[in-house]
Image (spheres, grey):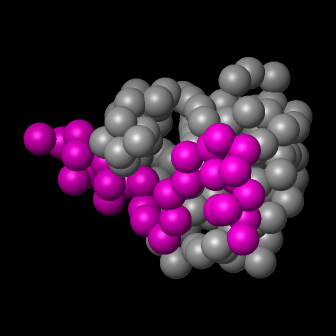
């Protein structure tokens, strides 16, 4: 599936979301929200982000998640991918600078699309702002 098609999904769980508006996870999530995506914040340090309930992990989310957008270090990816598989997410998206080949292979083997080392906001600008 192409990135352009992946961007047609609507529900995005942002793992590692920050309360700091200067952090990429914060402004990317805000951008996606402003462009019609349903954002589900995921960070065990918060109970709320932008007046939205913040979940401690993917397994706690009570609705279907299309894209798991990950803002965590590469070594933190494997358990997040395990949770993405458990909740039957459609896509695991590792943000720019995040690469974990082993976790990507596991997600793909489970039938999940994988995007690595790309920013969803930049890809949106390439494909959707035409």
Q: Is residue 12 above or below residue 46?
A: above
Which residues fall within the magenta stretch?
102-130
Magenta span contains residue 104: yes
Magenta span contains residue 85: no
Residue 123 is situated, as x and y percent measured from the top left of the image, at 32, 54
Could you say which is closer to the camera, residue 113 or residue 54? Answer: 113
Q: In screen coordinates, is 24 left or right of 3? A: right
**What's the residue at 74%, 58% (across, down)?**
106
- Judged from this view, the residue extending furthest toward the front is 109
Residue 51 is situated, as x and y percent measured from the top left of the image, at 66, 33
Question: Which quadrant is the C terminus positioned in?
Answer: top left
- Judged from this view, the residue extending furthest toward the top is 63
Q: In screen coordinates, is 103 left or right of 1? A: right
Q: In screen coordinates, is 8 left or right of 64? A: left
Residue 20 is situated, as x and y percent measured from the top left of the image, at 61, 63
Q: Quadrant of residue 60?
A: top right
**What's the residue at 23%, 46% (across, down)?**
127
**What's the residue at 74%, 21% (across, down)?**
63
**What's the residue at 46%, 30% (across, down)?**
9
Q: Quadrant of residue 86?
A: top right
Question: Which quadrant is the N terminus positioned in?
Answer: top left
Q: Is residue 44 above or below residue 38?
A: below
């Amino acid at each position: 599936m192409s990135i352009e098609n992946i961007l047609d999904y609507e529900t995005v769980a942002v793992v590692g979301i920050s309360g700091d508006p200067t952090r990429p996870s914060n402004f990317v999530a805000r951008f996606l929200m402003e462009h019609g995506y349903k954002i589900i914040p995921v960070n065990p340090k918060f109970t709320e982000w932008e007046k939205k309930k913040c979940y401690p992990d993917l397994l706690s989310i009570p609705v279907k998640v299309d894209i798991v957008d990950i803002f965590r270090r590469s070594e933190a990816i494997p358990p997040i991918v395990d949770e993405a598989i458990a909740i039957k997410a459609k896509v695991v998206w590792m943000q720019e600078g995040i690469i974990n080949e082993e976790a990507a292979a596991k997600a793909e083997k489970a039938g999940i699309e994988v995007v690595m080392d790309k920013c969803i906001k930049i890809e949106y600008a390439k494909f959707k702002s035409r």
